Amino acid sequence: MKENKYVQYAVRGATQFEILMTIDVKHPREIDNFINELRINFFEIIQTPELMLITENLQYNLFPKGLLS
């Protein structure tokens, strides 16, 4: 996973068989490619991938106005 171009962040979940990750793609087809690659490389481990799609990247500025300028 460290060398996959789509993976931004990966961490073990609450159970030994759970891995949570964030991927960044430009096109929805890349999600399919990524999942297929996971299934090919880890077919004996992955039973059911679960996806939560986030289509917006919201950025918040928590600094008071004028603090950074």
Image (cartoon, helix red, strand yellow):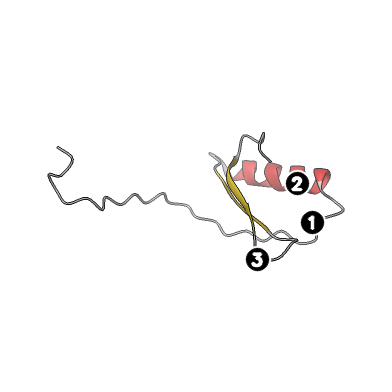
Mark 3 vs mark 2: in front: 3
In the image, residue 13 above or below residue 26: below
The one nearer the camera, 61 or 28, is 61
As drawn, the label of residue 46 is 1
Mark 1 vs mark 3: in front: 3
| Separation of marks 1 and 2 at Cα, in angstroms | 8 Å
Are dots 1 and 2 in contact, CB under 8 Å? yes
Residue type at tag 3: Ala
Which residue, as the protein is rendered here, is positioned at the far right? 44
Categorize mark 1 by other alpha carbons within 10 Å: few (<14), some (14-19), many (20+). few
| Separation of marks 3 and 2 at Cα, in angstroms | 20 Å
The one nearer the camera, 1 or 52, is 1
Helix, strand or loop under label 1: loop
Residue pictured at 70% horizontal, 65% vertical:
15
As drawn, the label of residue 25 is none
Residue pictured at 84% horizontal, 51% vertical:
43
The numbered mark, 3 or 2, whose residue comes first in the sequence reads 3
Where does label 3 land, which residue?
A: 14
Where does label 2 land, which residue?
A: 38
Q: Percent from the top left, x then y, of residue 24?
A: 54, 42
